[in-house]
């Protein structure tokens, strides 16, 4: 429900909105009869709400992150209460609204509330609230970490500020963020704790230190050769929590901050025990995967972690350094893999509101959403802006739900129209980031601009067809043909990089009689020019193996997937990775860590290959069509997606045996034949 009514909001009148400001506690007492208390709580910032001393929800980072220029969000809670006096206490931190990630110094966090009491009474953001900012939380900042003094209590209460804001307020429509797992350390060496897994979340620390001692907790994804934390790649993110001890047995878990880490360093405690709270959007997971190559099984597991670690309320590039933002390019690259892994359509649909909200005045989609001023500009960038088309289309493909297209269609049309206008005037869409982080195999930016211009026209034309908009379908298809002719005249005989060839094949950019020549050239590039290695960046990687296997080179696709020397998917796995690295060479035995200026060990983009592993190797398509492509060194492979399971095994004869299990109420199709619910078995010879 969206409303643009003017609302009253609470704020702390002494808060300056400066970075590293104290967290404020808002408090209000009230009398109520016995029954159900209904609360709606929203914030510009992050809130943590307690009723009579108990957290009212297990959701974290509420209400989430959105484009604060355009709207704010609230969550709804219901709680049975006994008759009598009650107290609400709500902590309010800056979160994504202010503080370092927002890059703003003038934003005072605000709180909105509506309470409906069992006996019919109501109250909201009125002057009967009071607030205090001299409690334990000196600051709680997403990049910097938290400073907490357990010896402090909220004691000095003062009247709140109440301000009218005209800002549309919407019920949170995504999936809540929660603590989804708790990990115990695999080792503790002096002050260094190893959780054995690169994760997003924070520590839960039981510790003892003399009264007033400051315990310092730092986070890192990797260790230096001398066993100390490797933190250079965090750049400006301090990622440090400090907690002042009471002298008793203390417990500490930060509130409004999270970190991307595998290792902790805990200094200043006499003794401590640490656990890691794994925090992300609480998706239903619906994929399992295993095969006879343990490195490949581990790769799939790393891709899963990479997704969960980068899905804390919005899809992000990475969870550790001073970025952690909704880069649209990364999201469009990974969106298919994300759907194989999790039930994430609601998550993407909510994020797409912010992709639409951050369009420029011409309707070009942004490079980052929710909007951040420091990443403003560059709307329309090829491969990034196209997320505004590719993501809704993918959600539709995986769910069959046309309403996601309806929600995004007008914006998709406008985006294509704006691009077409540029193109008519002789400008192909800009491709600011090129084929980001390729392995010395650049693709010309004009090529990428033209390829994505055509891709978005094509997908939008398909959306027009689904929605029955004949008139726009014809226009889009006509424009697509024009752009394709332009492509054929200018590029089709001049494809050099793996990404150029893969995109030309996958986006159907070539004349039919050129397809095989290009596919063979791509195969040779991989085998001969690169010695059976890939060289694609973010934009080409999701398409590389498909381009090969769809055009007679499945063996090469398998060999690339199982390659273990750099650059490859399994090289990091062989060297102990537990997530997907940002660069093919984020770390190598010869050179150690890559350029710390940009070197995350938890970026999901290259993990897009999961779409090939499940969609082609296991052969499970989103619509339950099955077409497995066994190969490589594998003796067996098994995958289950939404209850549909496929296992194939190599037979001594060289052929394969297939076991398929179709869940109740579903139908699958295997090479043309319809498979009803139940178990099925086939043998297909060599
Ligand atoms: C991010 C990327 C992003 C890129 C834009 C980086 O700093 O981490 O993943 O897509 O900038 O090129």
Image: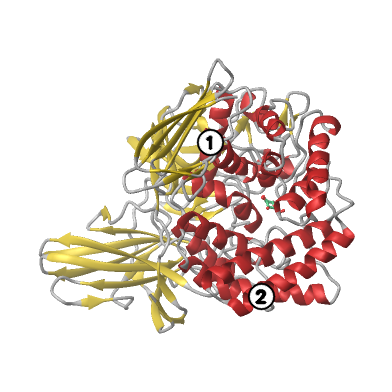
Q: Is residue 685 above or below residue 28?
A: above
2 left or right of 514 in image:
left
Q: Is residue 500 above or below residue 363?
A: above
Q: Is residue 524 above or below residue 122?
A: above
Q: Residue 293: image x %, image y %?
A: 57, 23
Label 2 beta carbon less than 8 Å to ligand 1: no
Figure label count:
2
Q: Residue at x 35, y 70 (%)?
A: 158
Q: Residue at x 56, y 23 (%)?
A: 655
Instruction: Classify 10 Å Cα crowding around label 2: few (below 14), some (14-19), many (20 and above).
Output: some
Q: Residue 474, labelled with which disc?
A: 2
Q: Nearer the viewer, residue 588 or 216?
A: 588
The quadrant of the rendering that contains the N terminus is: bottom left
Q: Residue 181: image x %, image y %?
A: 39, 38
Closer mark to the observer between disc 1 and disc 2: 2
Label 1 beta carbon less than 8 Å to ligand 1: no
The quadrant where residue 76 appears: bottom left
**Element type where label 2 sits in the image:** helix
Q: Residue 250: image x %, image y %?
A: 35, 37
85 left or right of 499 in image:
left
Q: Is residue 245 visible?
A: no
**Element type where label 1 sits in the image:** loop
143 left or right of 124 in image:
right
Q: CA distance from mark 1 to mark 2?
A: 36 Å
For disc 1, the marked residue is 618
Q: Residue at x 57, y 36 (%)?
A: 579
């Amino acid at each position: 429900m969206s409303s643009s009514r003017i609302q009253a909001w609470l704020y702390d009148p002494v808060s300056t909105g400066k970075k590293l400001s104290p967290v404020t506690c808002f408090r209000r007492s009230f009398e109520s009869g016995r029954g159900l208390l209904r609360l709606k709580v929203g914030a510009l910032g992050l809130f943590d709400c307690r009723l009579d001393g108990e957290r009212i929800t297990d959701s974290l980072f509420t209400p989430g992150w959105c484009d604060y220029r355009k709207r704010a969000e609230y969550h709804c809670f219901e709680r049975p209460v006994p008759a009598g006096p009650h107290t609400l206490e709500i902590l309010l931190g800056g979160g994504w609204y202010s503080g370092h990630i927002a890059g703003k110094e003038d934003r005072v966090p605000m709180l909105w509330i509506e309470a409906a009491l069992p006996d019919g009474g109501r109250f909201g953001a009125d002057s009967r609230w009071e607030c205090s900012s001299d409690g334990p939380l000196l600051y709680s900042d997403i990049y910097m970490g938290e400073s907490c003094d357990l010896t402090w209590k909220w004691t000095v209460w003062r009247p709140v500020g109440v301000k009218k804001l005209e800002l549309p307020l919407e019920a949170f429509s995504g999936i809540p963020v929660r603590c989804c797992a708790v990990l115990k350390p695999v080792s503790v060496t002096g002050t260094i704790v190893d959780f054995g897994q690169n994760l997003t979340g924070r520590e839960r620390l039981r510790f003892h230190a003399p009264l007033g001692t400051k315990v310092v907790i730092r986070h890192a994804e990797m260790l230096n050769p001398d066993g100390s934390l490797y933190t250079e790649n965090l750049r400006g993110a301090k990622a440090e929590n400090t907690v002042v001890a009471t002298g008793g047995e203390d417990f500490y878990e930060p509130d409004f901050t999270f970190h991307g880490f595998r290792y902790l360093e805990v200094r200043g405690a006499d003794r401590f025990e640490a656990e890691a709270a794994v925090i992300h959007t609480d998706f239903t997971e619906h994929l399992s995967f295993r095969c006879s190559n343990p490195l490949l099984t581990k790769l799939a597991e790393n891709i899963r972690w990479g997704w969960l670690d980068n899905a804390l309320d919005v899809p992000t590039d990475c969870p550790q350094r001073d970025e952690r933002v909704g880069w649209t390019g990364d999201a469009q690259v990974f969106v298919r893999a994300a759907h194989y892994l999790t039930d994430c359509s609601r998550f993407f649909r909510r994020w797409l509101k912010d992709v639409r909200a951050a369009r420029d005045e011409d309707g070009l989609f942004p490079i980052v959403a929710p909007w951040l001023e420091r990443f403003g500009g560059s709307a329309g960038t090829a491969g990034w802006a196209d997320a505004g088309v590719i993501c809704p289309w993918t959600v539709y493909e995986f769910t069959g739900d046309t309403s996601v297209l309806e929600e995004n269609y007008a914006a998709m049309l406008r985006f294509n129209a704006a691009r077409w206008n540029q193109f008519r005037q002789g400008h192909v869409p800009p491709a600011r980031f090129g084929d980001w982080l390729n392995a010395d195999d650049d693709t010309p930016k004009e090529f990428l601009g033209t390829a994505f211009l055509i891709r978005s026209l094509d997908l939008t034309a398909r959306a027009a067809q689904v929605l029955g908009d004949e008139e726009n379908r014809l226009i889009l298809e006509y424009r697509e043909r024009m752009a394709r002719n332009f492509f054929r005249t200018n590029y089709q005989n001049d494809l050099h990089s793996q990404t150029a060839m893969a995109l030309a094949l996958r986006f159907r950019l070539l004349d039919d009689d050129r397809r095989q020549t290009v596919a063979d050239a791509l195969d040779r590039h991989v085998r001969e020019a690169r010695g059976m290695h890939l060289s694609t960046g973010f934009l080409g990687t999701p398409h590389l193996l498909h381009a090969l296997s769809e055009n007679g080179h499945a063996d090469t696709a398998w060999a690339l997937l199982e390659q273990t020397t750099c650059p490859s998917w399994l090289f990091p796995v062989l060297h102990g990775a537990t997530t997907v690295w940002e660069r093919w060479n984020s770390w190598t035995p010869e050179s150690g860590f890559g350029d710390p200026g940009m070197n995350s060990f938890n970026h999901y983009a290259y993990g897009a290959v999961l779409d090939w592993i499940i969609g082609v190797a296991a052969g499970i398509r989103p619509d339950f069509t099955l077409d497995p492509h066994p190969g490589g060194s594998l003796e067996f492979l098994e995958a289950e997606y939404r209850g549909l399971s496929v296992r194939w095994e190599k037979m001594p004869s060289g052929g394969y045996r297939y076991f398929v299990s179709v869940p109740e109420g579903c139908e699958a199709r295997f090479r043309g034949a319809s498979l009803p619910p139940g178990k099925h078995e086939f043998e297909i010879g060599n």
